[in-house]
Image (cartoon, grey):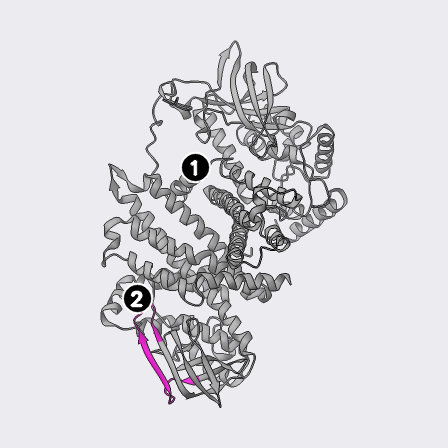
Amino acid sequence: MSEISITDFRNRARAWLEEHAPRRGGGAGPGEAGPADLAAQKAFQASLYDAGFAGLTWPREYGGQGLTHAEQIAFSQQARDFALPVGAFVIGLGMPGPTILELGSEQQKKRYLPKMLRGEEIWCQLFSEPSGGSDVAALITTAVRDDDGWVLNGQKVWTSGAQYSDFGAVIARTDPTVPKHNGITMFIVDMHAPGVTVRPLKVATGAAPFNEVFFDQVRLPADAVIGEVNDGWRAAVVMLRNERVAIGTMAGPRTSPLSYDSLSGLADRLGTSADTGLQRQLAELYVRERSVQLFGQQLREEAMAGRDPGPRGSVAKLAGAELAIFASLVAADVLGPAAAGSDSRDVRAVLTAMIAAPGGSIAGGTNEIQRNIIGERVLGLPKDPGADRGTPFNQLRVGTLRKN
Amino acid sequence: MALLLNDDEEQFRDSVRRFVTERSPLSKLRELMSSGQPFDADTWKQLSDLGLPGLIIPAEHGGAEAGYGVLTVALTELGGGLVPSPLLAGTLAAGTLLRLGDQQARDQLLPGIASGELIATLAAGGAGTVRAENGTLSGEITPVLNAAQAEVLLVPAADGATTVLYEVAVSAPGVEITPLPSLDHSRSLGRVRLSAASGRRLDGDAGAALEFAADLADLAIAAEQLGGMAACLAMTAEYAKIRLAFGRPIGSFQGVKHRLAQLHTSWELAHAALRDAARAADERPARFPRAASVARIAVSASYVDAALATVQLHGGIGFTWEHDAHLFHKNAISQHALFGGPGQQLDRLTAQLASAAG
């Protein structure tokens, strides 16, 4: 792809965004997705699709534009200045979509991908379970063969967008007599099917951005399998890798209450900024924030140059999670006694962000899991000889041991 | 592609890396430690032939005019090999002169620095002050890079409330230079004591030149530190793969694996920050001071952590004189202290952030 056509593409994207998309910081953000907001998001995604800016790197026969990563990056860079109302589609297009593209059947690609791109159908991802956490492969939701299909039973947790999703990519145990990674299958589940129950999950901040999803005798047709039966772990790894790169290289909004800019401004207003110790902490926060940003930029440049970031997405994810924790500690010093209680809106926003900070070090694989990945796949250190390797799943202990 | 290495930089990195492996391995540093020599004259000659002392010096003064990106790439490789040389001293002296604008000093000193034949050093980066009175200098500065090998000193001094810079020949009366026992075996340091010493007062804005020299010191030392840190990580990860305990390689234990993963993460962030600072120096000078501070702070303390981990994760053997771990530990401590220790680094960035906001 030549420089000229990229420039041309960038200019077209910019012009379209200027005309159709709201500017960042111009009022309400993505928000909690009420019915009205959802309708607006669907309308926007449809117009994005019709203008030729959805599914840039996806093949044309499935509704994509058949372009390269260079256009994708050019578009993302332009889009950073705008608050695109597309939050409901981020998961589907970032995770199940690319996975179906890579492993799905021809019929699945034709049936699902164009509607996903046009925003007509919303998708969620159903991986985590209460019993598993970071050990996703220890999942106990089952899918059992029945006539020419399957019956799904079990519970998923931390599912974003389940309350308004039409479909989900779910992984379930299909053979408990083999080691845990070998008996998992990925399915497409209709979220409106009988036996699917979605309940909001309230988190530490008091908000409910996630759901619990219960499956009770949910029937799945035979053609709901993504990839091969009992080869679902491979599909899950593809999806998790897409997730990590997405989280790690996300250009964080400058307006986060825990950013250097926000906290140094707040320190000025609260009169705590003259303290040398605090100034040094803020300077260190600036260094960490800036270097995490620069590393994300470097990964994007590498992708543009055709180099696969591979497991280094975990470096970005770990660094981002630790930055949030560090910022939450600096924030406590900036606030002083106001950290214990305040009726100022600014202070309340910082406190909420402080309580939300540990979330990033759990979601998408905990920091410990990221360190394993970096140690093993970047530095080449030997794997931990896990007790679960080689043992049939039905002989493994999973979940939480009862207290004595 | 602002942060990725360009072709010139990649090529230069490879040739300096090959040079370090073939001509200046750590065994060479051990020889110097035994003989008491500050650096190997042949090695310095060869580095000079590669053009290293003149990388940031314009062609009109005999330099390679290759830029700061190439300079940092070279310093990273030399830092990784703990190669003793007066390169940092000469680079900081040259950077000061380039920013100062004293034409006579440039014409007389830069060609010699660029060819590696003249060793010059900036008498700054440590403690102490010098006063300028009636055209002579008095005071003490310590430690100063390669003071005992230098022919020419660039001395910052206070003339009343004004900061000035003097060029002082080490042979001038009233100049007393004492070599110091330096913690880092790869770094030669000395004390400069001046008693009514005479020199030539240099033209130009000395304050601005010294600010630039401090930024350049941040950039150059960060590059060396990044190389030292990479060497520590490579050495320790390699050992963790082959050293067995409790029936398995120690690198399979999370206590070891996670510490290395954490250090690698710090290294990646610092590397991105260094690339950004080098690019700023070459292309966007107004952004350089802040970017240089970020790069230095991002690596400086992390290198000390990495060096400590190198000693400790090797276990007993890492604590012996024969093992290379202590060479890096000493280098890391020394590098963390020169031209602004941890507190000063942060205070400098605070001032830069405030001035940009104001």
Magenta residue check for B185:
yes
Q: Is residue A376 visible?
A: yes
SS at badge 2? loop
Nearer to the camera, B123 or A178: B123
Q: Is residue B151 visible?
A: no
Q: Tell me what residue is drawn at x 34 percent, y 51 percent.
A: B309
Query: Up-down: is A269 above or below A27?
Result: below
User: Residues at marks 2 and 1, common chain?
Assistant: no
Magenta residue check for B202:
no
Compared across the picture, whether A185 is left or right of B247 comes to right
Compared across the picture, whether A214 is left or right of B125 comes to right
Q: Which residues are drawn in magenta? A: B168-190
Q: Position of residue A332 (x, y in %)?
A: 54, 47
Picture quarter with the C terminus of chain A: top left
Query: What amino acid type is highlighted by mark number 2?
Result: His
Nearer to the camera, B291 or B231: B291
Label 1 resides on the chain identified as: A
Q: Which residue is mark 1?
A: A369
Q: Position of residue A174 (x, y in %)?
A: 46, 18
Q: Position of residue B46 (x, y in %)?
A: 35, 71
Q: Which residue is mark 2?
A: B185
Nearer to the camera, B294 or A229: B294
Label 2 resides on the chain identified as: B
Residues at marks 2 and 1, CA–CA distance in whole angstroms: 39 Å
